[in-house]
Image: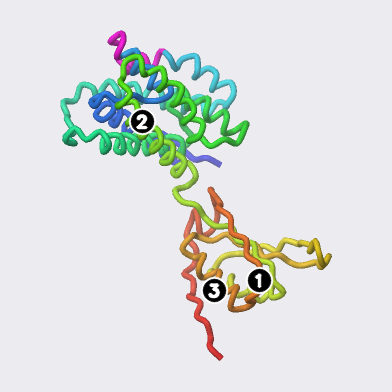
Amino acid sequence: METTTTRIKEVFFIVLGTAIYAFGLVYLNIANHLAEGGVTGITLIFRALFGIDPAYSTLIINIPLILIGGRVLGKRSFYYTILGTVSLSVFLWIWQRVPLEINLDHDLFIVSILAGLFAGFGSGVVYRYGGTTGGADVIARILEQKKGLTMGKSLLVFDAIVLLCSLTYLDLKRMMYTLIVSFVFSKVVDVLSSGGYTAKGVMIISNQNEAIAQLLMEHLERGVTYMHGEGGFSSELKKIVYIIVAPQELNEVKKIVHHMDEKAFISITNVHDVMGEGFTYLKPQRKRYFLKRS
């Protein structure tokens, strides 16, 4: 059950994320004449062609999208989308009026990398705590929930469409640098949205399954699960050992398995989000596994 402290934490990080995103947009994208994707990119087109402040156009364009997001995503997402959109507009207004210049010696490659990092980190923090900054974010979150598409991939598609329209005021050179921004942005968003790192899921098929499971639990301090399988050729019933570990623990898993059974079959997959002991809260200090020589 959510507590007041949890809600305050979520609100704080959503506001912080929009502040970071708006900072990069003003001092990197706008200052160096780079475009942006999604609704933000549309506001930059309006700024270039009609002189409309993005702080205002962001809010105006997002009103119908916020209403759609509220109906599809529920009350909590609706409120957090309003929070993200309004705070983004506020910080865009503020940063445009703070006299600050980031001198990168006119190196557009460095600018584009930094712009992608700022936008991706800021947006990723917002998404991780249940918010959006409106616009394409609302549609991307709907696709994530309904179709299973990651937000980074959905936003990359939206970005491409808006960036093509941005050629109305940008030359091809700056557009190519903007594509770097969008690529870095999507990668950072995916990393932050999935928990910051990829864990590893390991399936082990062996005649020594119980001994292997016991050693894994003892030396890694992680739980294992038995899954029942049947060999397609032999029709032999076997217990399959399944364990989720941190990437740095993978070599130790292999060492334990191969020490017990050199013919063991191991399948390793990426696990993009993990909750539970040892991942979202602390686990006991584990022992190191040392091979005993006979």
Q: Which label sits on residue 255?
A: 3
In the image, taking residue 104 as reference, residue 205 lies left or right, namely right
Mark 2 lies on a secondary structure that is helix
Residue under the point 27% across and 20% down = 93
Residue under the point 31% across and 19% down = 170
C-alpha gap between disc 1 and disc 2: 49 Å
> Extreme front residue here?
172
Quadrant, the N terminus: top right
Number of other residues with Cα within 10 Å of mark 1, as a class: few under 14, some 14 to 19, many 20 or more = some
Mark 3 lies on a secondary structure that is helix
Q: Is residue 8 visible?
A: no
Q: Which label sits on residue 18?
A: 2
**Residue 169: quadrant of the picture:** top left
Mark 1 lies on a secondary structure that is loop
C-alpha gap between disc 3 and disc 2: 45 Å
Instruction: Name the residue type under label 2.
Output: Thr
Number of other residues with Cα within 10 Å of mark 2, as a class: few under 14, some 14 to 19, many 20 or more = many
Residue 181 position (above or below residue 241): above
Mark positioned earlier in the residue sequence (1 or 3) = 3
- Range of residues picked out in magenta: 48-60
C-alpha gap between disc 1 and disc 3: 11 Å
Q: Which label sits on residue 264?
A: 1
